[in-house]
Image (cartoon, helix red, strand yellow):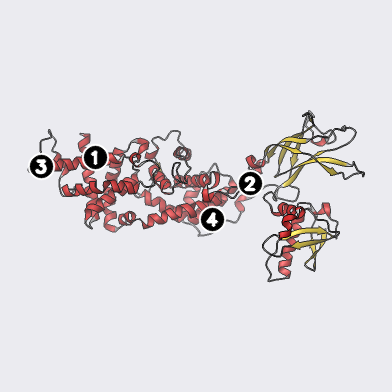
Amino acid sequence: MRVIVKCLEIRLDIPCGAGKQHIRWLALAVATRMQRETYPHAFRVPQRVLSSDGTVLKPRSVIKDVLEDGEEVIVELRQGAHVPEEWLYDEESKEWIDQAYGPQSNLMDCKFYWKTGSAQGEEIPQYVRGEYVVSPKWQPIFPQREYGGSFEIGVEPEPMERGAGDNDFDWVATRKGPPGVCNYVFVLKDGTEVPCKLTPDTLTPRGTMHRKDFQWDVPIASDPYPEVDSRPSTASRDGAQDPRFEEDWGALQLQWVDQFVKVRLKDVLVEFHAILVDLFDSYAFMGPECNSTMGMDDWKHLLINCCLLDGQEGGSLPWTQVCSWFEETAGVKDARPYLAQRVTRVQYVELLVRTAGWFMCDHPSGNNAPEEGKPKLPLDEGLFQFITNILIPVMDIYDDDTIRKDAVQTQNLAVIEQCRSAIRLIYTSLCRGEFGVFPVTLKFLFEFALERFEEVESNGGLAPPHGEVDIMGLLSGGDKLGLDDLREVLRVFEDAVSKTTAKHSEAPEQRTLLFWELFEVLMLCSRAVSEGALHEAIPKFVQTASAVLSLVER
């Protein structure tokens, strides 16, 4: 089938095959040809298609149903970027634009016919009542909750294809939808539900309702992604990724993600894998197995700094939901206390995808919320925007953080690695399950040591007796904080806690320290007493805290 098109005084011969495409396709094909014919002019959007007698052809009409082979039509192209002002007052033109490019332009017309005739009786139904179920293979693109479900639609007259006369028409109800199955009945004026006897091909075996299978009205793939693994992907380029990516990707479960979306997620993850691993390693280097795992407390610290948790300004993610995700990806039923759990790099990536899906796709707010009437972001796009708009800015702050810069200086890094196990022991000894470390508990360690030093000072340099334990023997020495050091630590302690917990949603007196925050307090206090030798102050802070803990345990 061929259609002759007149456009901007140019005549084009457009091959249409069997003519099963939409009129919109014809218009776009003409616009593309016109761009080539009149190069270097920009692409102009089609704004209407008219038959030779001036009748506007609906954009979703099928070509072979409204045109004959060799028939001539007119395609109008928009002259600029905006819809002509006069169209705002022309209902027919506005309808064409909406059907061609509006939010439902990718859906087909699902029609429910009430045929008139003697066998049917004279009473006409008021509307159609039904339940639409989107085809399962199309639900990842057209979710059931948005495109399916119950409906009631009024019927309108439509001219019959057969016969003639003033009363020669059927009645039809129309809804927009993707492929799916629908059970429906017609409802009379008195509320009685009846089937249409003149459409027996859609009646159920009992004859009480209709059941119709709707497929695309034009040639569209019967399966949205028949060979998803063959899709060209940046994630499959030779030499494009760190070997660790293939290791991580092979271990990722993502059982809750559709296969089609998973391929697109792979593209995003391979693009950002290096920086995501750097972020993981920045937490993991302080773990019990250096560079092997990060903690759930570290993950919570990251969420807090991204302002994502429920209770924070702009946050909506409940911590209980995060814990549920961890249990699912770790394959455990009860992982309490959650803050003490270790997270592998693969689990970290899965938690990252889950969090991006929650914040960018399922529960977007503020600048992340889609415009009214627009669908939510697909997961791969949500992950991309989450990394670029939320995660990377926080990582930039981390990169500029003086504490992190101090921690990786050669001498400081060496002593931190030596003290890592002791620092973790301090944290686990003071941690109270899901609450982290109460600052007053950490502060007590240094207050206790200071009181002992002040007792010695007030006693003329002699240590008062404390049973059989030589307290000052444990607390004093060149490897621990001295009297002036302890006073300086306590002087800056509250400010250090306030700075490290500034993004917590709780009131200041209710905040607790996660592991990384305890480490930050350690670094800030050590800097206050270091006089430029931070690598000397850090082990003294750790040794003093450890000594007091050993005394408390006794």
Looking at the image, can residue 342 be seen?
yes
Horizontal side of 456 relative to 532 (left or right) equals: left
Foreground residue among 145 and 136? 145
Quick check: marks 1 and 2 in contact, CB under 8 Å?
no
Q: Nearer the viewer, mark 2 or mark 4?
A: 2
Residue at image mark 2 = 141
Residue at image mark 4 = 235
- Crowd class of label 3 (few under 14; some 14 to 19; many from 20; radius 10 Å): few
Tell me how far mark 2 sits from mark 3, CA to CA: 77 Å
Residue at image mark 1 = 444
Residue 181: percent from left, percent from top: 72, 38
In the rendered view of the protein, which quadrant contains the N terminus?
bottom right
Disc number for residue 413: none
Residue at image mark 3 = 458
Quick check: marks 2 and 4 in contact, CB under 8 Å?
no
Tell me how far mark 1 sits from mark 2, CA to CA: 57 Å
Q: Could you say which quadrant of the image residue 135 lies in?
A: top right
Looking at the image, can residue 287 be seen?
no
Report the amino acid beneath label 1. Answer: Phe
Tell me how far mark 4 sits from mark 3, CA to CA: 70 Å
Report the amino acid beneath label 2. Answer: Ile
Tell me how far mark 1 sits from mark 3, CA to CA: 20 Å
Quick check: marks 2 and 3 in contact, CB under 8 Å?
no
Mark found first going from the N terminus, 2 or 4: 2
For the point 47% across and 49% down, the residue is 248
Tell me how far mark 1 sits from mark 4, CA to CA: 52 Å
Determine the secondary structure under disc 1. helix
Residue 450: percent from left, percent from top: 18, 43
Report the amino acid beneath label 3. Answer: Ser
